[in-house]
Image (cartoon, rainbow, N blue to C red):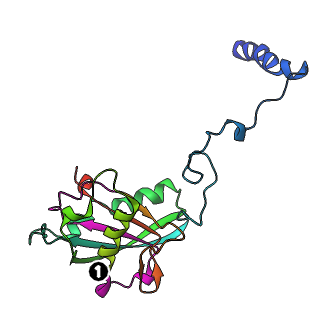
Amino acid sequence: MVLLAALLPLSFLVGAPAALGAPAADSASDCALRGTTGWTDEGHDTDFSVFQRPAGTIKAAMIFVDFPDAPAHSAESPADDAAQVTPGADWLWNASYGKAWLDIAQHQRWARMPHNSTDYGYERGMTHEQHEAYLKDAVAAADPDVDFSRYDMVYVVPTKNASAVSYTPTYMYEPGTAGVVADGRRVKWAVTFGQDMWH
């Protein structure tokens, strides 16, 4: 009773300004952070023509690449490397309250990239064009063994020996550009993993 009696005056005071003709509280949209990019800003509507919708089963092709200057060692298994990434499917399932599931198909063979790992400019600050060139080479290297028309997104996992592939950026197709096409389907979303998956 004491707590209820203490809260009654507070609720009266909170309601008092409206009774005296004060302006109503701002709406939640009035408090949203101002966007700067127009499409990747927190608190704004998501443009699902650009972003993958987080619902249902999302099919991902996981491909494994090595390089002329960083070949995979015979003891390195694509399955072991995949184990660093695949728990993300459980995380997505839990974070979406069971509304989205990542169905990751592992294509467990090493696809040799046409250039050295150091040739891709794979460092913080790499351009979208450099990233897209890396993805295009990876998809082309794996294409003889993978039907990319079956997948919504692509995961590219490099050999642990490729120290020049330092971090894990996300790729999104930019409408109006050539992009990456394989097996009659445009790759709109991809993640190219790097050394940070090990550290």
Residue 189: x and y, percent? 45, 67
- In the image, 35 versus 156, the foreground residue is 35
Q: Quadrant of residue 192?
A: bottom left
Residue that appears at 47% across and 82% down: 185
- Residue 46, percent from left and from top: 60, 56
Counting other residues with Cα less than 10 Å from the Cα at mark 1, is it few (<14), some (14-19), or many (20 or more)? many
Position of 116 with respect to 44 (left or right) is left
Residue 140 lies in what quarter of the image? bottom left
**Residue at the image position 17 percent from the left and 57 percent from the top:** 163
Specify whether residue 160 is painted magenta.
yes
Q: Quadrant of the N terminus?
A: top right
Q: Is residue 158 above or below residue 28?
A: below
90, above or below 142, in the image: above
Residue 183 place in picture, x, y as percent: 42, 86
Q: Which residue is identified by label 1? A: 142
**Front residue of this view, candidates 138 and 11:** 138
Residue at point 73% right, 17% down? 7
Q: How many marks?
A: 1
- Is 151 a magenta residue? yes
Picture quadrant where residue 11 is located: top right
Left/right of residue 128 with respect to residue 159 in the rendered view: right
Camera-nearest residue between 126 and 61: 126
120 and 85: which one is in front?
A: 120
- In the image, what residue occupies the spot 8% across and 72% down? 74
Dot 1: what SS? helix
Start-end of magenta stretch: 143-168
> Measured from the top left, where is residue 120 in percent x and y?
26, 64
Badge 1 amino acid:
Ala
